[in-house]
Image (tube, rainbow, N blue to C red):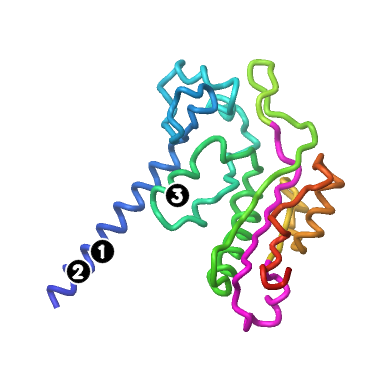
Amino acid sequence: MRSVLLIIDFYLIVFLMLMLCFIQLFKRAFLFAQLSTLSETDEMQPFPRRIMHLNFEDSQAILEDYTNAIHYERGTLNPDEHQDELDDKASTYTLTNVVPMVPVFTNIVWSRQEHIVRKRLNNYCRGTAYIVTGVTTSGKRIRRDNMDRIAVPKYVWSAYCCADYDQNTPFGERHKFPSFAHYALNVEENNNVVEMSVQKLKDFLEKTTFVSKNFQIFAGDCVPPKNR
């Protein structure tokens, strides 16, 4: 009995250590220094202390841009929930991977949809899944020091592609493979997620933002090779 308790205690300690790591990640933000100068590393880096990191503000958002943005939070485009390894989860906490999102939208509406997509892919995707996420804007900006700094998304959209999926997927989920998509308004109310085919998402984006005539979200529109 004592050995069982020791094993439980060990796993509890490991769990608590991992939770502390994630708490520290949430408190930090990272940058890609290579966006400012090619001589820098292509790995993400913690923001330098104090005034030094203002050197990067011409090429990417900095922490000060969000200081007085009380109506928005830093919402991730590539969420840590879609990553397995701790290093991969950490890589999602760069300011190049976040956009201003309304708190209730990012914490409830969009977060719930990310979980739905992950569960769906875990259950029925047998191969590699690819997820593309983006935004549309309407001119609204977060300002700092009387300057426009960050575009606020009007819509947030996402699509996934899994060409190798379970052919016995339940009928209610079957039409959501090999690809499917969704979008929602980045607002406090009337922000329900709308799910649709990738083609309908493309049609929507062509009407709401600038895209080229040959615009594709996935190569070959995610058509399995044997069906092309």
Residue at which label 1 appears: 11
Amino acid under label 2?
A: Ile
Q: Which residues are magenta?
A: 151-178
Q: Position of residue 47 (x, y in %)?
A: 44, 27
Question: Is residue 177 rendered magenta in the image?
Answer: yes
Q: Position of residue 145 (x, y in %)?
A: 64, 16
Marks 3 and 2, the one that precedes in the sequence: 2
Q: Which picture quadrant has residue 160? A: bottom right
**Residue at figure coordinates x 72%, y 46% from the top left:** 186
Q: Quadrant of the N terminus?
A: bottom left
**Residue at figure coordinates x 68%, y 54% from the top left:** 158
Question: Is residue 1 rendered magenta in the image?
Answer: no
Which of the two residues, 166 or 114, is positioned nearer the viewer here? 166
Q: Position of residue 138 (x, y in %)?
A: 80, 36
Residue at which label 2 appears: 7
**Residue at figure coordinates x 64%, y 52% from the top left:** 132
Crowdedness near tag 3: few (<14), some (14–19) or many (≥20) residues, C-alpha within 10 Å: some
Q: Position of residue 45 (x, y in %)?
A: 42, 32
On the picture, is 154 further left or further right than 106?
Answer: right
Marks 3 and 1, the one that precedes in the sequence: 1
Q: Which mark is residue 89?
A: 3
Q: Which mark is residue 78?
A: none
Amino acid under label 1?
A: Tyr
Amino acid under label 3?
A: Lys
Q: Is residue 165 above or below residue 9?
A: below
Q: Is residue 62 above or below residue 114?
A: above
Cα–Cα gap, marks 3 and 2: 27 Å
Q: Which picture quadrant has residue 178? A: bottom right
Mark 3 or 2: in front is 3
Mark 3: secondary structure: helix
